[in-house]
Structures are given as structure tokens and as C-alpha cells.
Amino acid sequence: MTETMDAPRAPGRPRSIRADEAILESAIDLLAEGSTIEALSIEAIATRAGVGKATIYRRWPGKEALLHDALRRLKPPPPEPPGQSVREDLIALVGMSGHNPDPRVSKIMPCLMPMMNRSPEQYRLYQELVEPRRRMLREVLRRGVELGELRDDLDPELTVALLTAPLLMQRLLRAQPDLDERDLPARIVDAVIAGIAAR
Amino acid sequence: MTETMDAPRAPGRPRSIRADEAILESAIDLLAEGSTIEALSIEAIATRAGVGKATIYRRWPGKEALLHDALRRLKPPPPEPPGQSVREDLIALVGMSGHNPDPRVSKIMPCLMPMMNRSPEQYRLYQELVEPRRRMLREVLRRGVELGELRDDLDPELTVALLTAPLLMQRLLRAQPDLDERDLPARIVDAVIAGIAAR
């Protein structure tokens, strides 16, 4: 396999892009199969990818950098919200939680979360993965305030937590067995916008 | 140690209550030190507690039952809310998240959460731990509706998710580095009650 991957290539093609892909995919597979980040070794990734360890070390300085690229591949930044109404954009952004089409994401993310606290590197890695969506949510909230649809004294960071945490807990951990999951993103957004106080 | 624990006791005292405590505490210690539930063995618990494995098996049929008692000991059901205003009772109940005085709780709970999905037993164990507070929250919400303070069309289960998920994500995982944590329970409750729509 290494043979093919490091074989002469057509001009203009980056060298051994297939080896890169095989290595990143192997790391993702191993995490999805239950390996912890701590237990994951360059050796195991190399074996799974059918390459030598040296092939990996030519591309990444170590496990941290490799995992960074693997997780970016698994969970690319979300697309910009559709730019409809504030409510619809919030629903689109909230609905992305735990809804990645790759089934490996829902296996890996719950394991990644508790690891966040074990090292500053892992915490940064997780934050880099989730920050793009938070930034978009804050922008939609700011637009809502500018349009006069949302309160101008809202706390953007707290609002982002209210919008995102319930769906994360539910989709990743099924935290509440009795929570109706139909249209959950829209119901969360509507509840956060309107509040529960009697009118 | 076993000697003392299994020694003759004063009438009316349960036999070897100190052995029970030592065993449960040892299981909690091992989890807090980073053992996964899967990796935790009766043998390791026995060694840590200074008892024989037989001493454990005389008290519990297996690891599952032992862990159930250990986690109940670590995280007893919350006290009833003070019975003040709906808002104050919600703040008291929300504020309990991840705020157990035992520092081992914040080490164990994030590890327990991803394990919930691995087996129905672990899922039930977690649900038993968290259900008492959820029940109290639903009762306070019902009181708020009856008093005319809260909307009568609120979804209790969704509201419980909005009230509890943000603080859990923050206290257990520090999910949002920029979220101001001062008075967070009160700010969550106020945001959920009032909503973010402009008035």
C-alpha cells in the first residue's frame, strides 16, 4: 500500500494525498471504535493505514497535530446560515449539533468531551472545533438585536449556551429519555426567544 | 482491617457498616482517580478497601449493584427546594448542577456521561441519579403555571433541558471559555423565564 501511495504521481497532484487520507481516516476509525485519545498511538494508526510510522512522522510532528487534522476532516466548519429570518438562521445553526452525517462523529464526540479537561491541548482542540458555529450564532444574535427583534441587553454567550447545550446533551448523551425530539431545534429556538413567562 | 470490621458489634448496630463504607468509598476513589467503569474490578476495589473479594460478594451480587450504591452515596438526591418564589426555587435547583461539595463528583460525572450510551445498565444508573432533581424542577414549573406566573403551554421536559444543560456543560466541561460564570444559575433562570425577544 505504501508503494502505491508514494509512487510517482501525475504533475499538479500533491504527493501521496491518498496516504494522508488513509492516515487521517485510520485515526478517526480507531477513535470511533473506542480508543481513547491517550491510548491512540502513532503505531496503531500506521498499522491501520497500512503505512510505516516514518510515513506519518514525515507529515505530522506528532499525535496532537495529526489528531487536529483528523478532527477538522471529520467535523469541517459549518456552512454559513441561510441568511433568512433571525429565527430560521438560529434553527439552522442549532440543528447542526450532533447531526453530522458521518456516524463516527456521534461515537467520538462524547468521548472527546470529558477528555477536554485533561489537557490544555485537548481543550484547545475541542474549542477550535466548536468555535466556528458559536461565532455564527453570535453574529445572528447581533443581527437580531440590530433589527430590533431581540432584546438589546441579551448576554450573547449565555444565549449561545441556552441554544446549544440542550441539543448537545440530548443528541450525544440522550440525557432526558422523556424529551420529545421532534423539531427539537425549532422548539429550543422558540422557547429561548419567547421565554416561559406568562404574557 | 477486615478483622476489626467483622468483629462482634454492639446490639442494634448493623454488622460491619464500616466495611460497607470502606468498600463504597474505595470504588468512588478509583473512579475519581481515572478508572473507567469497565476497567474497575471487584479485585481492585477489595485491595483498595483492605478487604477480601469474598467480603464484597457477601454484600453485593456484582459490580453493577456495588456501583449503584456507591454513586447514590456520592450523589444523594437533592434536598427539596426552599419553597420560596418559583424563580428562587428554580435557581436553587439549577444551581445544584455540578456543585456537589465532594470534589470527586466533578471528576467522575464527565466520565460517567459518555459511558451512559454503552450499556442499558449504565444508562439506567445515570438516569436514577439525575431523575430526582428533574422531578423537582417539573413540580416547580407546574406550580408556576398554576400560579399564572408561567405560560400554560410550556413544555416541561424541554424547559428542564434549557434550565439544566447549559450549567452541566459549563461546570463539568467548561464548554464555553468566554461564558461569565458569576450568578450563572440565576442568569440562566431569568433568561429562560423572560426569553430574548424584544418587548
Image (cartoon, coloured by chain):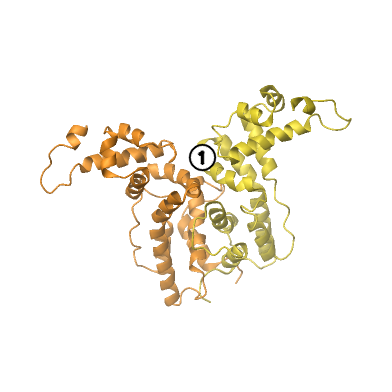
Chain colours: A orange, B yellow
Q: Secondary structure at mark 1?
A: helix
- Chain identity of mark 1: B
In depth, the one of B22 and B96 nearer the eye is: B22
In depth, the one of A134 and B16 nearer the eye is: B16
Location of residue A145 (image quadrant): bottom left
Location of residue A50 (image quadrant): top left
Q: Relative to B192, does residue B12 appear above or below in the rendering?
A: above
Residue B80 percent coordinates (x, y): 73, 54
Query: Does residue B118 appear to the left or right of A54 in the view shown?
Result: right
Residue B147, can we see it? Answer: yes
Location of residue A39 (image quadrant): top left
Question: Where, quadrant-wise, is the N terminus of chain A in this rendering?
Answer: top left
Query: Does residue B114 appear to the left or right of B143 in the view shown?
Result: left
Query: Does residue B98 appear to the left or right of A100 in the view shown?
Result: right
In depth, the one of A132 and B26 nearer the eye is: B26
Residue on which the image places disc 1? B117
Q: Residue furthest left?
A: A11
Residue A52 percent coordinates (x, y): 27, 33
Query: Does residue B17 appear to the left or right of A188 in the view shown?
Result: right
The residue that appears at 73% across and 52% down in the rendered structure is B79
Residue A181, can we see it? Answer: no
Residue A2 percent coordinates (x, y): 21, 33
The residue that appears at 74% across and 26% down in the rendered structure is B2
Question: Where, quadrant-wise, is the C terminus of chain A in this rendering?
Answer: bottom right
The total of numbered circles placed on residues is 1
Q: Residue furthest right?
A: B11
Residue A189 percent coordinates (x, y): 48, 62
In depth, the one of A141 and B35 nearer the eye is: B35
The residue that appears at 69% across and 32% down in the rendered structure is B23
Q: Relative to A171, does residue A152 appear above or below in the rendering?
A: below
Q: Mark 1 packing: few (<14 Cα in 10 Å), some, or many (20+)?
A: some
